[in-house]
Image (cartoon, rainbow, N blue to C red):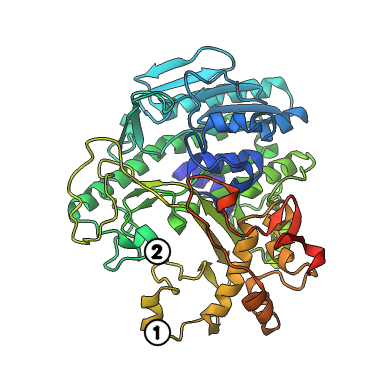
């Protein structure tokens, strides 16, 4: 993406350790626009009853989220492209999304149809753009909203949200309609880009279709992908790259217009994505919804006044931090309910934050996992010789019981997805792995169970956290401030505290959404630290 490189990478700061905390679009977007973790905003799926625009509105978020709050502070709020799933041609006004000055939203069931999109502006009726390339339509609408925002002569916040490089989806109706069906295909590129990347293949990383299974649960049962499907996935990857080129051109057009208006030097531009994507990693097909690095590690680039140019930082940041960052950049007081902290954008701010060693990412997910593309009807099989040769003839099959809690712990000295290596290929807690190590598994210079005891306690905090305990979970375990990193917590002084006193993370049952009774031990409720139902100060 040469224009992203030109306008953002070389003129801004790349936050190369930025993460989405839920690896699917609607919950991730709800986190961006509320500043809350998914277990607090309770939008945990793309569709009702556990997610989607109807649930977002029903829970009252439509009156209490970033657009409403910033508009109340005098900021003009403009948006085009995808807002949420199940924001449809029939419910777009039930209610209208709150807090916006100017809008032009993509609507289901046409959101992911590259050549047959439908948009809805303000309080107007939806308009079909059949035959027009979706990303180009989003670009033109974004530029028109920019013109409108500039003419208002007030501080403004503009969001442009194309769907590329998402797969193309044909839906015969909204998921709210009976007998709806889906047809998933590769992304569609604009005609001017279809000749590009013809020799490019899906990156052959360490975890690309490995000879040995990896991961846990249903992932560990997946058969190896055969050559026929690998060829298809290579074509799918090329299509994703091709589809991104129109997004790259959109970025260029936006910067050209900002410069023509004389706004380039006093405007912050933030570039990111709602979730990542895997293709053949860990024997998975094409999709997301796991806690693997490919699915949760997403871009974040910021350019603007005082932001270091052509700079890359190792600071760990998450989508939970974005709403506080918006407020901070606009000079609006932070809201007490935010679960994240503002991301520093100046050189001095970045240096200070790195010294504080913020190193954790809370990752959570409820419900199903699925694959995208024509080879998406594959379920885990006990027979690992399953050939995966039959394309889908109907809707893709779903892997149920994909609910999980996870941690990413990242510093200069360790890089853990709970407790496995950066390629996420060796499960250090599996009986097979421990047996191969002669029962002497060591991590960070000590028996692995000592490290796991610390991670279990940290996960118990983050899976139920609110406000400060989400941003500073170690301080919930050590309120006197003597522990702020995993390295600090590994001191032998705390062995009894972690290995004997702490409760473990368990699920009473596996649910498709956030149901508190199924979530196991809770470390925090309503901002009061608890254990066994007793407030923190009665037992600390």
Residue 267 location, quadrant: top right
Percent x, y of residue 455? 58, 69
Percent x, y of residue 42? 59, 42
19 sits left or right of 169 in the view = right
Residue 1 location, quadrant: top left
**Residue placed most toward the observer, 26 or 70:** 26
Q: Dot 2 lies on which element? A: loop
Return the disc, 2 or 1, that comes first in the chain's sequence: 2
Q: Residue at x 73, y 41 (%)?
A: 327
The answer to whether residue 417 is above or below residue 338 is: below
Q: Residue at x 52, y 67 (%)?
A: 418
Q: Residues within 10 Å of mark 2 (few under 14, many from 20)?
A: few
534 sits left or right of 88 in the view = right
291 sits left or right of 156 in the view = left
Which mark is drawn over residue 437?
1
Residue 314 seen? no
For the residues labelled 2 and 1, the Cα–Cα distance comes to 19 Å
Percent x, y of residue 385? 18, 61
The answer to whether residue 256 is above or below residue 214 is: above
Which mark is drawn over residue 216?
2
């Amino acid at each position: 993406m040469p224009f992203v490189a030109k306008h953002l990478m070389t003129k801004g700061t790349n936050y190369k350790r930025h993460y989405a905390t839920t690896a699917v679009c609607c919950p991730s977007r709800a986190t961006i626009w509320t500043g809350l973790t998914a277990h607090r905003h309770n939008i945990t799926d793309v569709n009702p009853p556990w997610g989607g625009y109807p649930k977002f509105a029903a829970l009252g978020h439509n009156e209490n989220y970033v657009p409403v709050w910033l508009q109340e502070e005098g900021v003009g709020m403009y948006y085009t492209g995808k807002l949420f799933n199940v924001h449809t041609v029939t419910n777009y006004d039930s209610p209208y999304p709150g807090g916006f000055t100017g809008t032009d939203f993509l609507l289901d069931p046409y959101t992911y149809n590259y050549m047959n999109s439908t948009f809805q502006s303000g309080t107007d009726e939806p308009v079909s753009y059949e035959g027009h390339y979706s990303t180009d339509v989003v670009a033109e609408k974004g530029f028109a909203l920019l013109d409108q925002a500039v003419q208002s002569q007030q501080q403004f916040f503009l969001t442009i949200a194309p769907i590329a490089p998402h797969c193309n989806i044909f839906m015969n109706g909204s998921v709210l309609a009976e007998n709806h069906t889906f047809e998933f295909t590769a992304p569609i590129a604009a005609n001017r880009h279809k000749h590009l990347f013809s020799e490019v293949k899906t990156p052959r990383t360490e975890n690309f279709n490995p000879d040995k299974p990896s991961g846990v649960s249903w992932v560990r049962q997946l058969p190896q992908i055969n050559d026929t499907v690998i060829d298809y996935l290579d074509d799918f990857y090329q299509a994703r790259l091709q589809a991104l080129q129109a997004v790259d051109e959109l970025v260029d057009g936006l910067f050209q217009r900002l410069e023509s208006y004389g706004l380039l030097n006093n405007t912050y531009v933030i570039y990111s994505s709602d979730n990542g994507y895997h293709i053949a990693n860990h024997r998975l097909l094409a999709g997301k919804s796991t806690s693997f690095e490919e699915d949760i590690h997403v871009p974040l680039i910021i350019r603007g006044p005082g932001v270091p140019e052509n700079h890359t930082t190792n600071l760990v940041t998450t989508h939970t931090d974005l709403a506080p960052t918006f407020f901070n950049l606009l000079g609006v007081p932070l809201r007490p309910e935010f679960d994240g902290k503002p991301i520093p954008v100046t050189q001095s701010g970045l240096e200070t934050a790195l010294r504080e060693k913020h190193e954790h990412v809370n990752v959570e997910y409820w419900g199903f996992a699925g694959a995208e593309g024509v080879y998406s009807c594959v379920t885990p099989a006990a027979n690992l010789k399953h050939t995966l040769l039959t394309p889908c003839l109907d809707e893709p099959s779903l892997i149920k019981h994909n609910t999980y809690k996870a941690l990413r712990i990242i510093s200069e000295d360790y890089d853990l997805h709970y407790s496995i290596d950066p390629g996420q290929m060796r499960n250090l807690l599996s009986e097979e792995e421990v047996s191969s190590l002669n029962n002497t598994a060591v991590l960070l210079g000590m028996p692995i169970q000592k490290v796991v005891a610390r991670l279990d306690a940290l996960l118990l905090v983050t899976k139920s956290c609110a406000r400060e305990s989400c941003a500073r979970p170690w301080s919930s375990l050590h309120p006197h401030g003597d522990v702020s990193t995993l390295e600090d917590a590994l001191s032998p002084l705390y062995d009894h505290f972690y290995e004997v006193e702490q409760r473990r993370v368990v699920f009473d049952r596996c649910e498709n959404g956030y149901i508190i009774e199924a979530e196991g031990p809770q470390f925090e409720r309503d901002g009061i630290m608890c254990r066994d139902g007793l407030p923190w100060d009665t037992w600390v």
